[in-house]
Image (cartoon, rainbow, N blue to C red):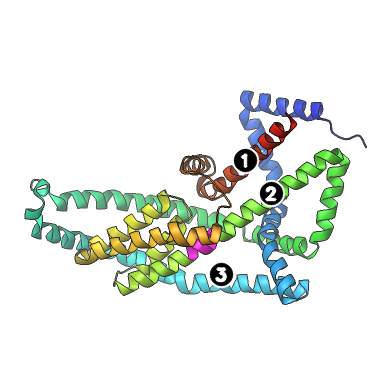
Amino acid sequence: MKKISKPILTGISLIIIYTYFNNPTAITSSISKIFSYFSVFFYGGVLAFLFNPLLKLIERNKKIKRKYSISIIYISLIVIVSLFFSLLVPKLMRNISDLLANYPHYINSFGDFVDKYRHLLPFLKDVNILNELLLIQQKALIFLQQEFTFLFSQFLGVTAKILSLVFSIIFSIFFLAKKEYFHTLSIEILNLLFSSETSLRICRFFKRVERVFLGYLSGKSLDSIIIGIIAIVGLFILKVPYIILLGIFITIFNFVPYVGPLIGILLGVSIAIFTIPNHAIFVLIFLVLLQQFDAWILEPKILGNSLNLNMFWTIAAVTFGGSVFGAIGIIIAIPGFALIKELYLLKLETHNSNN
């Protein structure tokens, strides 16, 4: 079989680019249609990709056979998901409903608190805090109504795809159980289509993808969970209400560098201002110290310098990923940019050594 040469690849790439600029919907619709046929294989491969390091860890350190190791992983996953939906989700929903029900009371209490200390803040003399807060409340309720309507429609769509999720999990188990076979098959296909040098480069590329993405996602997940648990414990000690809601928000937003921790602080302080205004300053100090602990001690300890992205490229990655792929794009864009930087430096080093 004749291998695909660089001119052919270049020609195919130019045709795709030309088609995209002239009729972009043709490519996107075709990709979506093809993806719908193979989505269960794709999601199964992603799950296998994420669980493979854990499988290797159990097999290597615990000396457990593969079928039992896979059983341990998926049973643990089912238990964790079940506990999350049975314990945390009901409390989260109660937090949200209670917050919405008591919001007018919190508005009035905060207005009284501001009136009590208005003489210390001259710039608030001519500001009607109550009217401003009621206006914010109206906008917030409209926003929440729209978001809950959207989430409900998405929930209906998700329930219709439960069968697809089940098949994806089944295929991920197959991929993990026979991963050596699929690895060998992939190399054989690459060797049939490309030269040995190109095949080797592609294999090295995917090795780098695995190292960068899995290293970042696993490390950042562990870091965010630890910060979320510490936040829940600290807010409980400070007697801040809705700690489950705040803990989940802080955990999620901790995935977003620089901006995410700031949003978590603002959410925590906002809840404290409306519910326990006299202790809001202590909540602010605690959350700021927590994020400084994460930035200077915990995150470097877990992630190290694996990404090695400065602030500009990190913010650029978050902005680009969020605008193109949404919430998932924010998470995967950072290791994606780190991978591009690593490949660029490798190419630059090769170029300089050749010259």
**What amino acid type is highlighted by mark number 2?**
Arg
Q: CA distance from mark 1 to mark 3?
A: 34 Å
Mark 1 vs 3, N-terminal side: 3
How far across and how far down the image is residue 80, in percent? 56, 72
Magenta-drawn stretch contains 222: yes
Residue at (63% x, 51% y) in the render: 212
Q: What residue is shown with label 2?
A: 208
Q: Quadrant of residue 61?
A: bottom right
The disc placed on residue 6 is none
Q: Say which residue label 3 marks.
A: 81
Q: Residues within 10 Å of mark 2 (few under 14, many from 20)?
A: some
Residue 155 image offset from top left, x and y in percent:
51, 57
Dot 1: within a 10 Å radius of its alpha carbon, few (fewer than 14), some, or many (20 or more) residues? Answer: few
User: Horizontally, is 144 left or right of 9 in the view?
Assistant: left
Q: Which residue is mark 1?
A: 340
Give how far apart the Cα atoms at labels 2 and 3 are: 30 Å
Residue 13 versus residue 82: which sits nearer the camera?
Answer: 13
Task: Give the percent coordinates (x, y) of residue 307.
Answer: 57, 49
Looking at the image, which residue is at 14% across and 61% down? Answer: 113
Query: SS for tag 3?
Result: helix
- Looking at the rendered image, the quarter that the C terminus falls into is top right
Of tags 1 and 3, the one toward the viewer is 1
Q: Quadrant of residue 27?
A: top right
| Three-letter residue code for mark 3 | Val
Whether 354 is drawn above or below 202: the answer is above
Q: Residue at x 23, y 60 (%)?
A: 273
Q: CA distance from mark 2 to mark 1?
A: 10 Å
Q: Is residue 82 visible?
A: yes
Q: What residue is shown at x 18% (from left), y 60% (from top)? A: 110
* Range covered by the magenta-colored residues: 220-225
Residues at discs 1 and 3 in contact (Cβ within 8 Å) = no
